Amino acid sequence: MSAEQQGALLLKRQLKELTKNPTEGFSAGLIDDDNLFKWELMVVGPPDTFYEGGLFKAHLYFPKEYPQRPPKMRFISDFWHPNVHKDGEVCISILHEPGEDKFGYERASERWLPIHTVESILMSVISMISDPNDESPANVDAAKEWREDYYGIFKKKVKACVKKSQDDLIS
């Protein structure tokens, strides 16, 4: 069996498990039933955060070498956050290639490991949403606002994303 077939089998099993036992905070499915390597997610804004009430669409793209290499995650919905690039790509340690970080920011144990599942990735993303790492931001502007004007401009921009995510569901 090829690595790609093994990855597809693993993804099929994880999808089945998530469908049978949904995890609070997100839902997951395939973008296209014929491709196990591209998933669509709906991430619920965590309670007691500015993101609460938001339903944010995201995609998870798995490489053919999954689970040896990490997937990429991108918010399709507008998402203002220190650890999400302006194009929507999520930047967290467990989605970084395995091994040592050449910049020394992360330990190898914090980076991608083949034992991670879609569920563990999404639990990490939900945790990241609630508790950003502003030491190593993907969106420098959002990190600056998060530090300097949390209840002002940062909150206003996040609330606009929440409202847009709700409006997008209706339309």
Image: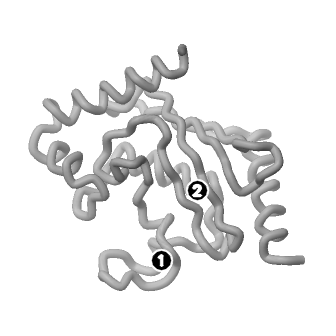
Q: Nearer the viewer, residue 84 or 135?
A: 84
> Which is nearer the eye, 130 or 1?
1
**In the displayed structure image, the side of residue 155 where residue 165 appears, left or right:** right
Dividing the picture into quarters, in which one does residue 19 lie?
top right
Q: Which mark is residue 45?
A: none
For label 2, the SS is helix
Q: Position of residue 96 (x, y in %)?
A: 47, 70
Q: Secondary structure at mark 1?
A: helix
Image quadrant holding the N terminus, namely bottom right
User: Total of numbered circles in the picture?
Assistant: 2
User: Which residue does the image show at 38% across and 45% down from the upper left?
Assistant: 129
Mark 1 residue type: Ser
Q: Is residue 45 above or below residue 61?
A: above
Query: Which sits earlier in the primary sequence, circle 2 or circle 1?
Result: 1
Q: Is residue 113 above or below residue 147?
A: below
* Coloring basis for residues: one colour
The disc labelled 2 sits on which kind of residue? Answer: Ser
Tell me the quarter of the image containing the C terminus.
top right
Q: Residue 161 at what x, y percent from top left? A: 36, 29
Crowding at dot 1, Cα within 10 Å, few <14 / some 14-19 / many 20+, comes out as few
**Residue name at image x 65 percent, y 70 percent:** 115
Give the left or right position of residue 154, taking residue 122 as reference. left
At 58% from the left edge and 46% from the top edge, which residue is drawn? 59
Q: Which mark is residue 120?
A: 2
Whether tag 2 and tag 1 are in contact, CB under 8 A, the answer is: no
Instruction: State how far apart marks 2 and 1 are (Cα).
Output: 14 Å
The residue wearing badge 1 is 109
Front position in the image: 61 or 25 = 61
Residue 164 drawn at (x, y percent): 40, 23
- Left or right of 16: which side holds 145? left
